[in-house]
Amino acid sequence: MTDDGASVVSPAAIGRSIGTAARRALGGRRFPLLDRIAFALVVLLVLVALVGLFVTPHDPFMVNTGQAFLPPGSGHLLGTDNVGRDVLSRILAGAGRTLLVAVAIVLCATVIGVLVASAAALMPRWIDESVMRACDICMSLPSLVLALGLAASLGPSMMSIVFAMIATSWPATARLMRNILRETLTSSYVEAARTLGMSRLRLMRRHVLPNSLDAIYVQASMEISGTIVMISGLAFLGVGAPPPSPDWGSLIAQGQNHITTAWWIALFPGLAITLAAIAFGLAGDAVRSAVDPSSRRS
Amino acid sequence: MTRFMVRRSCLALLSLWGVATIVFFMSKLIPGDVARVAAGRLATREQVEAMREKLHLDQSVLVQYLDFMKRLVHGDFGESVVTHQKVSNDLLNVLPTTVQLVVLTMIIVVAVAAPLGIVAAVNEGRAADIAARVVLVLSGGVPMFWLAIMLRWSLSLRLGWFPISGTNSVGMAPPRVTGFTVIDSLLFGTMGNVVDSVAHLLLPAVALSMPFITTLARIIRSNMMTAMKSDFITFAVSKGVPRRRVVMRHAFRSSLGAVVTIFGMQFGWMISAAVLVEAVFSLPGIGSYLYGSITSQDTFAVLAAVLVIGLVFIVTALITDMLQRLLDPRVRNAPGGAS
């Protein structure tokens, strides 16, 4: 650790840590084929999500009732919906509004969780304890329903879902992060630094946080898959962005009304969610086993 | 033990207070005129003003909060602006359907997850293990509301094997006594009523069970793998106990404790996840109620339902913890287990 400690965790340390993880993940010989496929899928999905925000084969919002309910096939690969919009284009346009939003939610919840956990670790013991007890209580509540209630109170928009998901998921993250930090705090090099008289703040920033990063990545990467399914569920229930938003949950909700006449409208977005959830789930497992080989066979 | 019970109950009370407080502050987040929202979109000016007075919206937040808590303790969750019924009555009417659904889901989860987990653990690394894990990855990734739509479309609408929606076919509803259609059918109806009631719950339960099958089977698998490597299994095998008996009587039984815990915790999760599935099958449970309230923008009914699900969630977690202590002496006597 040669960084100057100017920021809480220096970018250099993050870069090194990501580099190590990526090298372990992609270059390692003992890395199974399945994990590499999962990583490739995740990269592909993220690229599609980014590109899909700007470029799609057809305009995902263009209404053309003359082209309504066209089955999958020529011209429209996955068919058209009830007002003649191209289903494939809408799925591509919705990828960003689903996947990138899920990643953003996990990122925000993790940052808040890490900040709260490290602040609590620096505070006097009783504050630390009460913050963690409060997190315990939050964790004992059903997050899906709380997010639903919160998003319903805020009114239908994608931001409601984002806010509700962050608000209901950070306590769990903070609790986990506190455990990770506690584990790092007991390691011998931290003990050594403490014995040398290093202040708690400096100890946290120079030793504990950089050395906890691996575990934090693992946690975050494992969260994404579930978050994708959950925000789709919330959007499906109608607390998300109002029509004509093409996020995957809303697409399924729109397709549900026409399931008997046009099954393709609801089928394909669901396959997309399943594929994304599995890809991100497997990638999360892969990151975990790269960082902690002992978890590989469990 | 008593000490634990008291501590655990205090924690549950604290959680109840926590969820009530969170729901109260959610109602403060509603944009615009809350009295207008609470009175409904078609309310007259006088009705809005009456609602403002009733909810103490003209007074300080603290007074409103205390009043909210007072009404909760008396079991008053407010009125729906759509049905003009007390929300607590509405919820009591729909709760049995959800409980039935969740109980059936639990049966399916155990029936599928236990064999999968055991087979995977016993054949660790072999084809059966890999096959089981592929199934678990799929069931863990598929969004249940979409699966519900697809099952309903393919098996009910196209093939006609299962009923399309609701709790009973026309003329097949048992007399409503307990509200649990299956129990009412068993007690007061014919065999036809029973079959009809269960058939209406089956597809929703299958869709709802998916993510829980994955969680439970993975836990059973890893617990079984640990158990199979422990000394008492080696001893049983060397004693000449048949393999099937070792697996079922020795290894599986010792991993049952964790199953009970996970299961109790999942009961609450299933109740909340049921929202997604009930909405698809129009099962008149607490989930459909919640969905209907969201659609008709009956925000106070939404919050009341959130509160009720929170209560069920906390109480089941409490009961599970207590049961586990009573059933498993290893947990009861574990060092430091008092906390």
Image (spheres, helix red, strand yellow):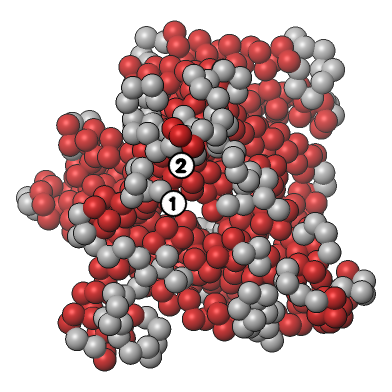
What crowding class fits label 2: few (fewer than 14 Cα within 10 Å), some (14-19), or many (20 or more)? many
Query: Picture coordinates of residue B188 (x, y %)?
Result: 26, 91
| Labelled disc at residue A82 | 2
Quarter the C terminus of chain B occupies: bottom right
Q: Is residue A242 visible?
A: yes
Q: Amino acid at mark 1?
A: Asn
Where B335 sits versus B131, above or below? below
Q: Amino acid at mark 2?
A: Asn
Query: Picture coordinates of residue B130 (x, y %)?
Result: 23, 33
| Labelled disc at residue A257 | 1
Where A117 sits versus B58, above or below? above
Secondary structure at badge 2 equals loop
Secondary structure at badge 1 equals loop
**Residue at (64, 32) in percent of width and height:** A104
Query: Picture coordinates of residue A153 (x, y %)?
Result: 71, 58
**Residue at (92, 74) in percent of width and height:** B58
**Residue at (24, 85) in percent of width and height:** B186
What crowding class fits label 1: few (fewer than 14 Cα within 10 Å), some (14-19), or many (20 or more)? some
